[in-house]
Amino acid sequence: MSFFDKVFSGETSFDRIFLKKNSERRTADPLSARPKKKRTRLGIFTFTMLAFAIWASQPPSQWVPEPTEPSTSFIVKGHDLATVVAAVEDVGGLITHRLGIIRSVAAKLNAEQSEALQTHPDILKLYLNGSVESSSASQEIYLGDLLDAAVPPADKGGNQGAPYSVFPEMVDADLLHFQGIDGWGVTVAVLDSGAWNNHFAIKRNRYGQKRALANYNARTDQMGGRDRSGHGTHVTSVLLSSDSPTDSPWLYNSIAPFASLVSVKAFDQTGMGTYADVIRGLDWIVAHREQYAIRVLNLSFNAPAVSFYWDDPINQAVLEAWAAGIVVVTSAGNLGPDPMTVGVPGNVPYVITVGAMTDNHTPADGDDDFLADFSSAGPTLEAFVKPDLTAPGGHMLGLMKKNHRIAKDHPELHGYKDYFSMSGTSQASAVVSGIVALMLQLEPWLSPDDVKCRLLASARPAVAEDGSPAYSPFQQGAGLVNAYAAVIDETLGCANTGLSIAADLAGTQHFVGPARWDDTTGAFYLQDFGKSWQGDLAEGGFPWTDTNPWTDTNPWTDTNPWTDTNPWTDTNPWTDTNPWTDTNPWVDTNPWVDTNLDAEAEINTWVDPI
């Protein structure tokens, strides 16, 4: 009997399989005992890199194990919030979160209560309320960050003393600032560990006007809450700090220095949060989008994908936010360069998922830029191309208080004044969120799909000397984002074609992407793209050019399956009860591929070596 047969038949469970490994990991020193990443070709493209990550965090899964403690936290989903509340109260469960955005509650249940709810007529599904990390104790710091942190960088005029974050120039955002396109009138929500809201550069714009509109703590369900981690502050700073290295009216250390901010705290000082906290934060954002004119949502965190994109509770809330007109930008994750390492919520096909590149510490020389080694790559389990594009994410200078947890753990990376050097796709996603704010300032009528289309159409792929793409689309997506090009672009109708978010949310139809798996070569490929990839990064630096080498068809927006034939075995691994809708949710054929369960997995960290 295969592993899948055992799991679905109930003879074994993910809990029992990974309990020992979980215990071993928790007792090991995360820094000294952490094994070196292996750049395998086939072994780590597995969906088990994601499914296997149930160990310490145990995020929601399509399989519901029996609680091993007297009381376990579950997310209970039904047809509407009122009936779910009534059902949980009827069995004596303790409700901790009301998550109306996905018609669910988080509740503490014992084994008898959870069993009763699984067969309750008003309950659709139970998920474990797993953990999510924005940072962790096993984080790695890139020593190259010291080059920026140790010495105050020179400003535009060559003076020492004021730090200058070069990334706005790398994406041509400075050209827009000079023309008054700086995010004015656009509100960005950042769901993270909070923000240093009383720092002048975050609280107010250059003119001293308050632009930090709200500060919600999803952990306590109350207004207010300080950032004790530093991750949220750094991400927010990259996005919209009003600080400047000089008195220049157009030079800033962020992408959208005049955008307004709504800060939502869902992670504690160690970077830990729960699915329920994150979803409650997303619920609050969507419910208050009109009050604060929220148009952009930045999500710089990842959790392992252990179910289909539409079946993950965080993803369900993210889909609701996109459908409500909010442009959602999320980090790809820092588990690269191996394929199939993009986690939740970056695996949602509709949203804008961002990978990271670096200037190689030579911002004036674009010919040696390269894709960051840590940047997670696609395709997703459902065969979609992710990330959608890349942005600067190496040695990013941003604000962080010296007593924030991350800064205290790594004082060597704290440079001049309040600036801290950090690398990760978290920072890259903040760059793109800032660019979206610039786009919406100029054209507020753009829909989320319109914004995504223009970002993809105006991106600049990295190319080799012969003009061919230097990296696979599963690594760089459409290429490096460019703020100026995105703002002036007029393309429409090129993103999320063939998809229906209404059908996805209703559960009547779900979708698969254009990726293919070649059994002969052992590589992923796109039928209309022709470039195969086994997971290795191209070596050396490459220029990010204005010439787009993509084919006439957009391979990141099609909805074709992996292969023409079904790669499943003849035996059906599913349980007798179908966890999906009564109707077949697939488009064309099943996109899944066989995978092994022996790969090492780890939850995404906030920073990894370049």
Image: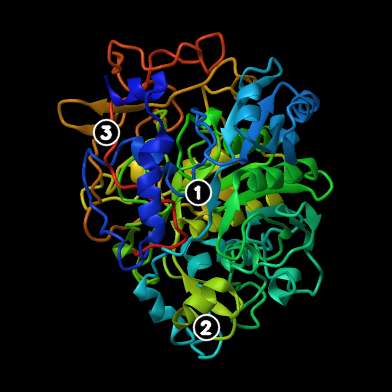
Tag 2 and tag 1, C-beta contact below 8 Å: no
Residue drawn at the location 43% of the way across and 86% of the way down: 150
Nearest to N terminus: mark 2 or mark 3: 2
- Quadrant where the C terminus sits is bottom left
Report the residue at 61% width, 51% height from top.
298
Q: Nearer the viewer, residue 510 or 82?
A: 82
Instruction: Please tell me how crowded label 1 is: few (under 14), some (14-19), or many (20+) other residues with Cα within 10 Å.
Output: many
Q: Which of 226 and 453 lies nearest the eye of the viewer?
A: 226
Q: From the viewer's perspective, is 61 left or right of 212?
A: left
Type of amino acid under label 3: Asn
Say few, some or many: other residues with alpha carbon within 10 Å of mark 3 (under 14 / 14 to 19 / 20 or more).
some
Marks 3/1: CA–CA distance: 22 Å
Q: Quadrant of residue 378?
A: top left
Q: How many marks?
A: 3
User: Disc 1 marks which residue?
Assistant: 302
The structure residue drawn at horizontal position 66% and vertical position 30%, both measured from the top left corner, is 76
Residue drawn at x 62%, y 57% is: 267
User: At numbered mark 2, what does the secondary structure look like: helix, strand or loop?
Assistant: loop
Q: Quadrant of the N terminus?
A: top left
Nearer to us of marks 2 and 1 is 1
| Circle 3 residue | 596
Instruction: Choose mark 2 or mark 3, whichever is in front.
Output: 3
Give the class, few, some or many, for how many residues have Cα within 10 Å of label 2's Cα (few <14, many ≥20): some
Residue 506 or residue 487, whichever sits in front: 506
Secondary structure category for the residue under label 3: loop
Say the numbered circle drawn on residue 500: none
- Residue topped by disc 2: 155
SS type, badge 1: loop
